[in-house]
């Protein structure tokens, strides 16, 4: 299943064809921020004008049919903690988050869960039979610490079955641009127990540098966890190559906003 670009009341989002729950992967388009944050910056802590960020969230919420002042957020730290969230975890914008987590899982209908990226891999999960969803921030560190394994485990604790879970791996830095040192391929080898054929290769003519397919590594891990290959969608867009459309930390050298991956059970 592929991703489709949708213009939702002026907010441009990517929608995964295999995820039936309300969801979206936002882009840079459709907001009111200016300067280096132009236009749909959803990062609360990037230095943008709070009122502009609030309006960006209002527009995103209107586009996706969710209340942006009553979502479950997390404090992302590039770890592997996944939190099961409930009604008590709703918060409004700019309200402090007491917990650290790079993944959120819930079975509460009408509770939007959201994670933020700007090159890292966003993954949305949905078991339509059990009514369980997840939103996972898969930077390379979180990935190799097996945050997806933790997420699937939490979903199973709420009644999901791996064979019923559908996954959408959204826009992120792709294998064309994710250049690393040897520590990342080594960690991916351990993460996938050696099942890494085609997931990294040396940069020609540059000793000690490699290109890594992080989206592909996470897809392979989901299959190891019991998801069906045909239930996994992978975006072909690279946030670095398409820094005109997506926020990219690498392309902007950190002077950027944040996009979001959002999902909500009806």
Image (spheres, grey):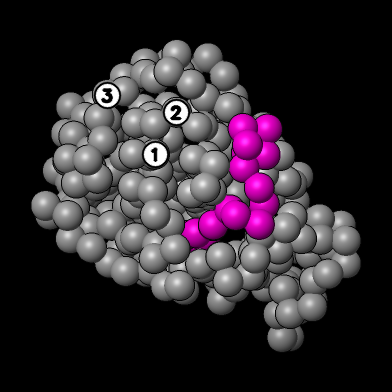
Q: Are marks 3 and 1 in contact (CB under 8 Å)?
A: no
- Which corner quadrant of the image does residue 80 belong to? top right
Query: x%, y% of residue 84?
Result: 58, 27
Q: Is residue 189 left or right of residue 93?
A: right
Q: Please tell me the numbered disc located at residue 108.
A: 2
Element at badge 2?
A: loop
Nearest the viewer among 246 and 235 is: 235
- Which corner quadrant of the image does residue 1 belong to? bottom left
Decide: few, some or many residues near mark 2? Use Cα within 10 Å; few <14, some 14-19, many ≥20. Answer: some
- The residue most toward the front is 129
Decide which of tag 3 and tag 1 comes sooner along the chain.
3
- Magenta range is 155-172
Above or below residue 73? Residue 191 is: below
Q: Is residue 44 left or right of residue 9?
A: right
Q: Is residue 190 magenta?
A: no
Is residue 182 in sight in this rendering?
Answer: no
Element at badge 3?
A: loop
Query: x%, y% of residue 250?
Result: 49, 58
Q: Are marks 3 and 2 in contact (CB under 8 Å)?
A: no
Query: x%, y% of residue 207?
Result: 79, 76
Q: Please tell me the numbered disc located at residue 265.
A: 1
Decide which of tag 2 and tag 1 comes sooner along the chain.
2
Nearest the viewer among 16 and 43 is: 16
Q: Could you tell me how far apart the alpha carbons at marks 2 and 1 are, in whole angstroms?
A: 7 Å
Residue located at (17% from left, 54% from top): 8
Is residue 72 in sight in this rendering?
Answer: yes
Q: Could you tell me how far apart the alpha carbons at marks 3 and 2 are, in whole angstroms?
A: 16 Å
Above or below residue 112? Residue 90 is: above
Residue receiving disc 3: 69
Element at badge 1?
A: loop
Decide: few, some or many residues near mark 3? Use Cα within 10 Å; few <14, some 14-19, many ≥20. Answer: some
Q: Could you tell me how far apart the alpha carbons at marks 3 and 1 are, in whole angstroms?
A: 17 Å
């Amino acid at each position: 299943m592929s991703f489709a670009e949708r213009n939702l009341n002026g907010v441009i989002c990517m929608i995964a064809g295999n995820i039936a729950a309300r969801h979206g992967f936002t882009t840079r388009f459709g907001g009111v921020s200016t300067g280096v944050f132009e236009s749909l910056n959803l990062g609360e802590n990037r230095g943008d004008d709070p009122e502009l960020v609030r309006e960006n969230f209002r527009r995103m919420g209107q586009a996706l049919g969710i209340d942006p002042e009553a979502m479950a957020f997390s404090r992302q730290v590039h770890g592997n903690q996944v939190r099961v969230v409930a009604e008590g975890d709703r918060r409004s914008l700019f309200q402090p988050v007491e917990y650290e987590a790079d993944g959120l899982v819930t079975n509460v209908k009408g509770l939007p869960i959201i994670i933020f990226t700007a090159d890292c891999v966003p993954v949305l999960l949905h078991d339509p039979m059990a009514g369980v969803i997840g939103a996972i921030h898969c930077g390379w560190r979180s990935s190799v610490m097996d945050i997806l394994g933790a997420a699937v485990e939490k979903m199973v604790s709420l009644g999901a079955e791996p064979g019923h879970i559908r996954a959408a791996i959204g826009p992120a830095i792709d294998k064309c641009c994710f250049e690393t040192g040897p520590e990342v391929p080594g960690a991916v080898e351990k993460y996938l127990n050696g099942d890494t054929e085609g997931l990294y290769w040396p940069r020609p003519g540059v000793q000690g540098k490699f290109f890594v397919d992080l989206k592909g590594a996470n897809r392979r891990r989901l299959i190891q966890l019991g998801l069906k290959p045909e239930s996994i969608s992978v975006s072909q867009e690279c946030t670095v190559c398409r820094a005109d459309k997506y926020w990219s930390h690498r392309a902007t050298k950190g002077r950027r906003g944040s996009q979001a991956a959002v999902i909500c059970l009806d």
